[in-house]
Image (spheres, rainbow, N blue to C red):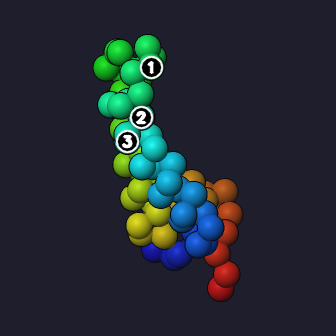
Amino acid sequence: MTVNVGTIDRIFRALLGIVLLIVPFVSGLAMFDGTAATMISVVVGLVMLGTSAIKFCPLYRIFGIRTCGL
């Protein structure tokens, strides 16, 4: 795996991942009353945290995007 996620991108992904993991459980929003929205939010949050941690995004590889320096 080649690193293709830069520092600013990693920070943004980590913050978004944390928010997506927390919001369904503490927000009280009606959209999270159902299981589907909660599960989608948790899965996307985990993917964001994972790609931030390993500095690699498979979609970036497919589309040829790099947000990090060489």
Residue 58 seen anywhere in this rendered image of the structure:
no
Q: What residue does disc 3 label?
A: 21
Contact, mark 3 vs mark 2 (Cβ under 8 Å)? yes
Contact, mark 1 vs mark 2 (Cβ under 8 Å)? yes
**Residue 22 placement (x, y as % from top left):** 37, 40
Q: Quadrant of residue 26?
A: top left
Contact, mark 3 vs mark 1 (Cβ under 8 Å)? no
Q: What residue does disc 1 label?
A: 29
Secondary structure at badge 1 equals loop
Q: Is residue 27 left or right of residue 7?
A: left
Residue type marked 2: Val
Q: Residue at x 60, y 63 (%)?
A: 9
Using a 10 Å C-alpha cutoff, classify the residue at mark 3 as few (fewer than 14 neighbours), some (14 to 19) or many (20 or more).
many
Which of the labelled discs sits on residue 23, or is there none?
2
Sequence-earlier tag: 1 or 2: 2
Marks 1 and 2, Cα distance to the nearest angstrom?
9 Å
Residue type marked 1: Leu
